[in-house]
């Protein structure tokens, strides 16, 4: 059984829990979902989800609770993470906002609340590297990805800007794959990874 940890200090936790369950079913992998509110849980997780929500709050609580350094160690060990929207902001190297103590999980800068200034939220079908059909991407006061490092793969763009990136074991999106019934982004980033390759998948 794989253990998925949803970082649950704030944000759309239950949506990620559902999405990762569906992705596990689609991949024939038994997946147990745990919610992370305290230190000591992350080290037992095979992969992590960093939800959308309010990045200033999430970042503060992660540091207060001692979860931040555990997430950093998880990534250093090469284990998968999917970070969405506020999760991307927290995972970045610089969010241009002193109230967000970023974790440097992906080599990318972001600008908060930069997409959809005119329109708070919108949905658009986007092409994602590794997916056959466009993905229905929901953007809600979404961060724009700015400078990305050389080792960062851009998986999707919208309006000429990166909106999904991969840096080693971490996939981060400006949009919210957890808010649609489509669990392919969760599958791509968590189950179809080097970390799980080589393990026998039951038929
Ligand atoms: N605007 C939020 C932030 O900066 C992110 C929005 C979201 O996660 N939907 O934290």
Image (tube, rainbow, N blue to C red):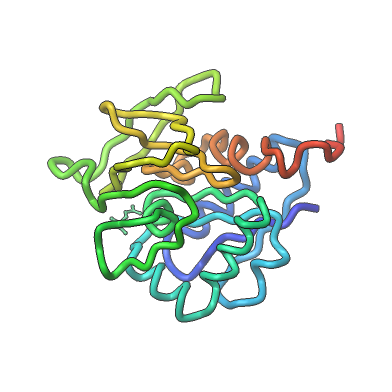
Give the total of numbered labels: 0
Location of residue 73 with respect to 149 vertically, above or below:
below
Q: Which residue of the protein is positioned furthest toward the left in this rendering? A: 118
Q: Residue at x 32, y 42 (%)?
A: 147
Q: Residue at x 39, y 55 (%)?
A: 93
Q: As rendered, which of 192 and 145 lies closer to the eye?
A: 145
Q: Which residue of the protein is positioned furthest toward the top in this rendering? A: 132
Location of residue 152 with respect to 132 vertically, above or below:
below
**Residue 66 appears at what percent x and percent y?**
53, 78
Location of residue 126 with respect to 26 vertically, above or below:
above
**Residue 100 appears at what percent x and percent y?**
33, 66
Ligand 1 is found in the corner quadrant, namely bottom left
Viewed as shown, does residue 151 lie left or right of 117? right
Viewed as shown, does residue 156 lie left or right of 114? right
Q: Residue at x 66, y 71 (%)?
A: 41
Q: Which residue of the protein is positioned furthest toward the bottom in this rendering? A: 64
**Residue 156 appears at what percent x and percent y?**
42, 29
**Residue 105 appears at what percent x and percent y?**
49, 54
Viewed as shown, does residue 93 lie left or right of 183? left
Dividing the picture into quadrants, the one containing residue 32 is bottom right
Viewed as shown, does residue 9 lie left or right of 56? right
Question: Which quadrant holds the C terminus?
Answer: top right
């Amino acid at each position: 059984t794989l253990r998925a940890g949803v970082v649950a200090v704030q944000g759309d936790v239950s949506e990620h829990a559902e999405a990762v369950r569906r992705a596990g079913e689609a991949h024939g992998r038994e997946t147990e979902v745990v919610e992370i509110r305290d230190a000591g849980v992350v080290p037992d997780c095979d992969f992590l989800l960093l939800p959308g929500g309010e990045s200033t709050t999430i970042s503060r609580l992660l540091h207060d609770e001692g979860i931040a350094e555990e997430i950093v160690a998880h990534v250093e060990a090469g284990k998968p993470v999917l970070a969405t929207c506020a999760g991307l902001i927290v995972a970045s190297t610089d969010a241009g906002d002193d109230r967000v103590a970023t974790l440097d999980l992906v080599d990318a800068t972001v600008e908060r609340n930069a997409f959809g200034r005119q329109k708070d939220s919108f949905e658009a079908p986007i092409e994602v590297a590794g997916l056959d059909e466009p993905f229905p991407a929901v953007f809600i006061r979404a961060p724009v990805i700015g400078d990305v490092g050389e080792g960062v793969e851009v998986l999707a763009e919208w309006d000429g800007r990166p909106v999904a990136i991969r840096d080693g074991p971490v996939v981060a999106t400006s949009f919210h794959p957890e808010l649609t019934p489509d669990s392919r982004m969760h599958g791509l980033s968590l189950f179809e990874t080097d970390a799980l390759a080589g393990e026998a998948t039951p038929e």
